[in-house]
Image (cartoon, rainbow, N blue to C red):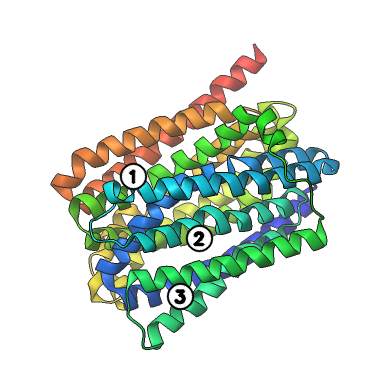
């Protein structure tokens, strides 16, 4: 990929994800106003639990697809068919598992139907959309990837408006049904688009079986990432209250939205990290160094802007979310910390150190859980904030330390 094509792909992803982030924010405002902090907090707890399991629904098959197709496009049919077969099998098993453990981990009183609808949405149909986006990403057709990521968000905005204005019960269960329908429609469109533009392949588990360890490392890495991003929402809902989880999740959503431009650059550069990483860490480090000054500068600026604008949030979401302003001011530094650790992580992955990356992320995820268990009963959402900041800071330090250590060993 040339510098020009990287810029073009970054712009496609930036435009697509910026529009997506704006649409997400709109439908989040509608959902927050329709459901209130209690019902929204319950829904968030379910989605957070499912998010931890979601990477195992594809078992890293989409990442394998990008890795191999970025290096040899003739392998597409093999790894695409394998990704679909893996997702169908794994998602079905994980949905059953989520249904079994939901009563233990989630707040009491949540309907099992709600849990199953969200699980099927995010473990099966949303993952099919993701894999379709990764298929286009492997060919550096980021305009298609951006469009596929935008599609479910637009459909959910329409569903959120319907929930707000139509005379239906304003409950998490009703929203989960609408959420399910929009995700199914998105998956159907995504699969049709891939078949039309790229082709298909035999539905076989063999390619993933052959690289089971590496694909599992991809899945473990993403799950660990979701744990230290989302486990606090589950624990807040269970240990403190759904209202506290809803307020905290609202602020975290703003941080995630602010991270959109950096995420766009990471998406655009992901395949390039694998291409340059064939030469070792030197290649992937060069790419990270080229991209970090701009993304790091943006992160510093947006973190300051979030701190200044935080008091306006209750005007947007309603007085049920008044505490969100204080939460956001505490969480604002996460934008910079995420930027730093994501580039270190992709530097390792591109050069073949995915297992190392995964182990570090798992360690931080365990630490995050322990900190939340310690602090949530005493400090509520503030304990979750401290746990997040400490975890992301340690993750940044550990990943960059490993990049430097492995680079020295390559030169030894």
Q: Quadrant of residue 37?
A: bottom left
Residue drawn at x 79%, y 53% is: 200
Q: Would you name the residue on which mark 1 appears? A: 388
Q: CB atoms at circles 2 and 1 under 8 Å apart?
A: no
Q: Would you name the residue on which mark 2 appears? A: 121
Horizontal side of residue 3 vs 160, given as left or right:
right
Q: Nearer the viewer, residue 354 or 398?
A: 354
Looking at the rendered image, the quarter that the C terminus falls into is top right
Horizontal side of residue 272 vs 59, given as left or right:
right
Image spot of residue 50 (x, y percent): 43, 51
- Earlier-in-chain disc, 3 versus 2: 3
Q: Is residue 186 visible?
A: yes
Q: CB atoms at circles 3 and 2 under 8 Å apart?
A: no
Q: Nearer the viewer, residue 163 or 300?
A: 163
- 182 w.r.t. 306: above or below: below
Q: Secondary structure at mark 3?
A: helix
Disc number lying in front (2 or 1) = 2
Residue drawn at x 78%, y 50% is: 139
Q: Secondary structure at mark 1?
A: helix
Q: Distance from label 3 to label 2 (Cα)? A: 21 Å
Q: Which mark is residue 26?
A: 3
- Count of numbered circles in the view: 3
Image spot of residue 248 (x, y percent): 29, 58
Residue drawn at x 18%, y 53% is: 240
């Amino acid at each position: 990929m040339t510098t020009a094509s990287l810029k073009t792909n970054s712009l496609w992803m930036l435009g697509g994800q910026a529009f997506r982030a704006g649409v997400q924010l709109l439908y989040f405002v509608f959902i927050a106003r329709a459901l209130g902090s209690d019902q929204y907090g319950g829904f968030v707890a379910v989605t957070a639990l499912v998010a931890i399991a979601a990477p195992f629904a594809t078992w890293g098959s989409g990442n394998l697809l990008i890795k191999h197709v970025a290096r040899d496009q003739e392998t597409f049919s093999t790894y695409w068919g394998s990704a679909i077969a893996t997702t169908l099998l794994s998602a079905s098993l994980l949905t059953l598992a989520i249904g079994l453990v939901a009563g233990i981990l989630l707040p009491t009183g949540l309907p099992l139907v709600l849990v199953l609808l969200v699980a099927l949405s995010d473990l099966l149909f949303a993952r099919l959309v993701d894999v379709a986006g990764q298929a286009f990403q492997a060919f550096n057709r980021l305009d298609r990837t951006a469009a596929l990521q935008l599609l479910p968000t637009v459909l959910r905005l329409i569903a959120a408006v319907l929930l707000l204005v139509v005379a239906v019960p304003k409950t998490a269960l009703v929203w989960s049904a609408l959420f399910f329908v929009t995700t199914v429609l998105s998956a159907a469109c995504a699969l049709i688009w891939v078949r039309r533009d790229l082709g298909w392949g035999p539905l076989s588990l063999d390619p993933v079986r052959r690289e089971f360890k590496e694909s599992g490392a991809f899945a473990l890495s993403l799950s660990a990432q979701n744990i230290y991003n989302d486990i606090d929402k589950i624990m807040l809902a269970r240990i403190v209250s759904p209202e506290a989880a809803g307020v905290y999740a609202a602020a975290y959503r703003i941080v995630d939205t602010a991270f959109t431009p950096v995420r766009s650059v990471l998406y655009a550069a992901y395949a390039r990290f694998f291409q340059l990483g064939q030469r070792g860490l030197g290649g992937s480090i060069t790419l990270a160094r080229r991209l970090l000054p701009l993304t790091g500068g943006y992160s510093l600026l947006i973190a300051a802007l979030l701190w200044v604008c935080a008091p306006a949030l209750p005007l947007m979401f309603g007085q049920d979310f008044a505490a969100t302003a204080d939460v956001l001011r505490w969480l604002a530094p996460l934008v910079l910390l995420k930027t730093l650790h994501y580039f270190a992580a992709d530097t390792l992955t591109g050069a073949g150190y995915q297992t190392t990356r995964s182990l570090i992320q798992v360690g931080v995820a365990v630490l995050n859980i322990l900190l939340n268990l310690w602090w949530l009963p005493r400090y509520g959402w503030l304990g979750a904030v401290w746990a997040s900041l400490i975890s992301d800071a340690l993750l940044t330090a550990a990943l960059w330390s490993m990049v430097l250590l492995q680079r020295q060993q390559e030169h030894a």
